[in-house]
Image (cartoon, coloured by chain):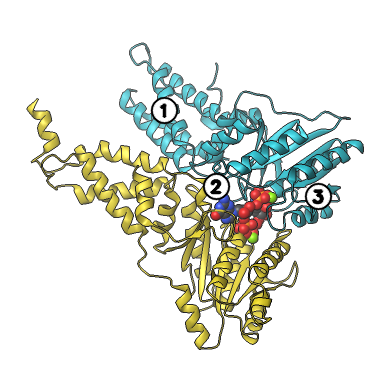
Chain colours: A yellow, B cyan
Amino acid sequence: LFGMFRSLVGSKALTKEALQPVLDTMSDHLIGKNVAADIASKMCESVATKLEGKVLGTFSTIAYAVKQSLNESLVQILTPKRRVDILRDVLEAQRSARPYVVTFCGVNGVGKSTNLAKICFWLMENGFRVMIAACDTFRAGAVEQLRTHVARLNALHPPSKNNGISQVHLYEKGYGKDAAGIAMQAIYAARDQRYDVVLVDTAGRMQDNEPLMRALAKLISVNSPDLVLFVGEALVGNEAVDQLVKFNQALADHSNSQEPRIIDGIVLTKFDTIDDKVGAAISMTYITGQPIVFVGIGQSYPDLRSLNPKAVVQALLK
Amino acid sequence: MVLADLGRKINNALRSLSNATIINEEVLQSMLSEICRALLEADVNIRLVKKLRENVRSAIDFDEMASGLNKRKMIQSSVFRELVKLVDPGVKAWQPTKGKPNVIMFVGLQGSGKTTTCTKLAYYYQRKNWKTCLICADTFRAGAFDQLKQNATKARIPFYGSYTEADPVVIAAEGVDKFKDENFEIIIVDTSGRHKQEDSLFEEMLQVYNAVNPDNVIFVMDASIGQACEAQAKAFKEKVDVASVIVTKLDGHAKGGGALSAVAATQSPIIFIGTGEHIDDFEMFKTQPFVKKLLNMGDIEGLIDK
Ligand SMILES: Nc1nc2c(ncn2[C@@H]2O[C@H](COP(=O)(O)OP(=O)(O)OP(=O)(O)O)[C@@H](O)[C@H]2O)c(=O)[nH]1
Ligand SMILES: Nc1nc2c(ncn2[C@@H]2O[C@H](COP(=O)(O)OP(=O)(O)OP(=O)(O)O)[C@@H](O)[C@H]2O)c(=O)[nH]1
Ligand SMILES: [Mg+2]
Ligand SMILES: [Mg+2]
């Protein structure tokens, strides 16, 4: 009986053997919450390294120690090392009389165009004029989708209330054209017409599709946007890792410049569809070390948030 | 597909059985761990993976089994039986009937590939000389009607939709009536993307369902989906009578294991898979031949039911 008691209260140092069953359970728990399997094991390994040899305080259990330690690591992963302050940067670009350019990229159907429209709404609410560049010249209806958004957004911020000046404009050249060229023309037009921001929509593409990844890298290296946002959906499982690794890789490999641009930040969409299975947030930030700049929580314009790391970790460990 | 890709890993794991001099609990557990790990990395639902593990474990009784050869065979066939259960719901796929209207309704999460797949399916039947058409009952997504219209026009498939009518139920009912009158055989209804957390969207889906009374409801899943699939698939099945599954975007790196939980949750077979953005990037999926092909791989041949 005393033997059992001691293993809980433990004046003895924690061993790998004692930790392992708890870590295995924890790893399964994280996978169940949609953290990529590989990342779940890596996180648990690092917890093991941290705890091994430590002496547990009185009345503390191994499970509690593991949970505490994991909590810390998770919050750390989700807490941005670098703050992306778009509003400040737009003002700075304004001072040098040039538009601030954001490019959206990601695989098919994750919510690039919709969240671009939400971010446009947020910028307009902050008093900025926005040009949207329709650089998805492939998918059926992609241009009309943006045109509809621009009409709705103009109705929300009508020119009649802004000295007759329209607050958002769609720059489009229809289908089948070179996306990089359209982005460039849109940026020139925005500079001439004093738009504050250019939001560049791109076609969805699979991370393994080399010609399409090359084209994206070209669009980005030719236009050197201020911000490259990767759009990923919270529904994605283990693929989150492969998507981000390969988008970054392609941007680096196919760029002509000395210092290639890679992903600066993440838009995590469809967060309203996953209940507490919030693991994709961990997978994406663990892989890139980049911040989740926006979280999409619905299909209408105000459904945009910033990430609350503590709340996400709470949902993960629940 | 997930199981095809898993073939090698599973083979390796099973080979560890052949290499082991004695087959005991430890050997079995380590082989099961390897298989389960591969399944989890392919996004197969964790509950299904745990169940698979338990089922194999409880099918094996070391005390009762005599020779090593017998043990190996028992374990291998038990593993395969469980794997097959993942893809095969044991029901026959729905088939349309010639010479009468067959109404097919598409449902699924936002962005899963419904609209694209609608045209692919219509094109598939049109090429087989069925009189085929498309209806756009998505009035929510910006540009939805343009998307369907452009796809349908390119493929020369008659379509119905509206820029002004805001109620998808009205459009769906009108479209189906019109095309039934014109003796169309395959009538495909595209709907908006939706999710279980938003009651009003699910209610709307039910209303469209009641208005068009479909012969087949197809649930469209993105191959990259992870652990959230099961709860969504269950909810769709509970609201409308999902009878078929299509897994899209299998041209990428994704194994589609997450989408498999939709097979279990809806008790419906996968009927087609999407392998690209173009209209003919579409393959028929037949569960039985797929499983057979899987079982015929190298060492696996003839392991089941002998
Ligand atoms: N529930 C929910 N749906 C979203 C969210 N963001 C986008 N969507 C929906 O996801 C679907 C796809 O969105 P799009 O913006 O067209 O996606 P995309 O990445 O531009 O797609 P492609 O350009 O075809 O690659 C639409 O139905 C959107 O309304 C979100 O945060 N929550
Ligand atoms: N690579 C690839 N892309 C696909 C496939 N199927 C669909 N897509 C793409 O996925 C994106 C979303 O497809 P949609 O057909 O618009 O999806 P949806 O389910 O109708 O979207 P909502 O109506 O907004 O819910 C588009 O960019 C399609 O081109 C596929 O099999 N492979
Ligand atoms: Mg788009
Ligand atoms: Mg659609």
On whether disc 2 and disc 1 are found on a single subunit, the reply is yes
Residue that appears at 67% across and 32% down: B286
Residue at image position (69%, 58%) is B142
Q: Residues within 10 Å of mark 2 (few under 14, many from 20)?
A: many
Q: Position of residue B11 (x, y in %)?
A: 47, 34
Where B186 sits versus A136, above or below? above
Q: Amino acid at mark 2?
A: Ser
Going by the numbered disc 1, the residue's amino acid type is Arg
Q: Is residue A91 placed above or below B118 in the rendered structure?
A: below
Q: Is residue A214 visible?
A: yes
Q: Which mark sits nearer the N-terminus, 3 or 1?
A: 1
Sequence-wise, the earlier of marks 2 and 3 is 3
Q: Residue at x 40, y 53 (%)?
A: A282
N-term-proximal mark, 2 vs 1: 1
- Vertically, is A20 above or below A2? below
Q: Which residue is mark 1?
A: B53
Q: Which percent across, then down, holds residue B36?
A: 42, 35
Q: Nearer the viewer, residue B74 or A130?
A: A130
Whether label 3 lies within 8 Å of ligand 4 gets the answer no
Give the chain of mark 1. B
Q: Determine whether, in the image, residue B73 is placed left or right of residue B100.
A: left
Is the residue indicated by label 1 positioned so its CB lies within 8 Å of ligand 2?
no
Q: Which residue is mark 3?
A: B161
Residue bearing mark 2 = B224
Q: To which chain does the residue with label 2 belong?
A: B
Indicate the chain on which mark 3 is placed.
B
Q: Which residue sits at x=47%, y=22%?
A: B78
| Most distant residue in the bottom direction | A96
Q: Check the image and name the residue furthest to the right.
A: B182
